[in-house]
């Protein structure tokens, strides 16, 4: 499936859908990176294309979407977090949002576990689990011939893996595409962080012998995989930088699982 920048995607917007008297089943929460980071916009487009292909009843907030406040809370600015959260909760209430699909583990975690403390209770689903469910139900069909035999490794994002125990869905998707999975020594609950979560992305590196993203990239490269699979915008940025630092852009790709599924989708 072609999901490049030149392809026109019809993405429904919540305000427009409500104006027609309809209420979508899912809110697709794009997140800051998915909306403004050029590289992660490709992931947003890929997942939107998948939703359209599967004929999922969804919509995005569009210009009404703001940050969840997760970086503010991680950085210690509790007041800013609560301001952001309460504003979004009111927006969700206006659109009667009940189910949310996210492509960012950080957004997933805070919406699922921390918004309820402020009155925002929703069914929050990370897209890897959503796609695994679609695969198991038979709605999502993948062509194994496109990626069969290629070696891939998967980097477990901290907020997806250790914090929310989502380990198997991403691997199930990779194997269903025909990819040969090569695990890093530190994987699943023992996986090494990419180095930029928890608001680390917005501060200078601390003193040390080696930056975390370089250590993690080296582990990924040692598997011999030509594809490093990720499912988090921070991990995408850090591992892409690591591949560039190691001068391996010619033979190693860092691809989000949504991009891989879009490639293999029938």
Image: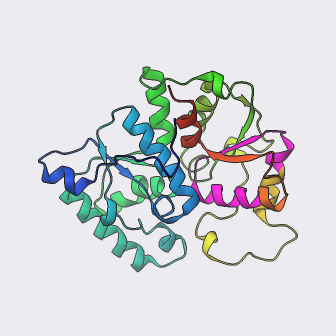
Q: In this rendering, is residue 201 above or below 252? A: below
Residue interval drawn in magenta: 219-242
Relative side of 58 to 5, left or right = left
Q: Nearer the viewer, residue 129 or 27?
A: 27
Q: Nearer the viewer, residue 136 or 30?
A: 30
Q: In this rendering, is residue 233 above or below 175? A: below
**Residue 72, percent from left and from top:** 48, 74
**Residue 214, percent from left and from top:** 80, 60
Which residue is found at the position 34% from the left and 64% from the top? 65
Q: Nearer the viewer, residue 26 or 144?
A: 144
Relative side of 18 to 84, left or right = left
Q: In this rendering, is residue 42 above or below 200? A: above
**Residue 233, percent from left and from top:** 57, 57
User: Residue 230 lies in magenta, yes or no?
Assistant: yes
**Residue 6, percent from left and from top:** 49, 50
Relative side of 243 to 59, left or right = right
């Amino acid at each position: 499936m072609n999901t490049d920048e030149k392809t026109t995607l019809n993405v429904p917007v919540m305000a427009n859908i409500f104006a027609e008297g309809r209420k979508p089943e899912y809110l697709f929460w794009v997140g800051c990176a998915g909306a403004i980071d050029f590289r992660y916009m490709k992931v947003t487009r890929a997942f939107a294309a998948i939703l359209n292909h599967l004929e999922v009843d969804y919509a995005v907030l569009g210009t009404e979407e703001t940050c969840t406040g997760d970086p503010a809370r991680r950085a210690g600015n509790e007041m800013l977090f609560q301001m952001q959260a309460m504003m979004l909760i009111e927006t969700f209430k206006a659109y009667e949002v009940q189910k949310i699909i996210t492509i960012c583990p950080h957004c997933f975690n805070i919406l699922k576990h921390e918004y309820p403390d402020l009155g925002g209770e929703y069914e929050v689903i990370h897209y890897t689990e959503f796609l695994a469910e679609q695969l198991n139900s038979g709605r999502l069909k993948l062509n194994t011939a496109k990626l069969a035999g290629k070696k891939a490794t998967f980097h477990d994002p901290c907020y997806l893996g250790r914090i929310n125990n989502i380990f198997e869905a991403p691997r199930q998707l990779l194997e269903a595409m025909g990819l040969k999975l090569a695990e890093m020594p530190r994987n699943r609950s023992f996986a090494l962080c990419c180095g930029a979560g928890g608001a680390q992305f917005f501060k200078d590196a601390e003193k040390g012998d080696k930056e975390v993203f370089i250590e993690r990239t080296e582990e990924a490269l040692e598997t011999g995989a030509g594809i490093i699979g990720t499912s988090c915008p921070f991990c995408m940025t850090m591992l892409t930088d690591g591949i560039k630092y190691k001068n391996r852009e010619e033979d190693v790709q860092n691809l989000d699982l949504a991009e891989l599924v879009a490639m293999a989708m029938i």
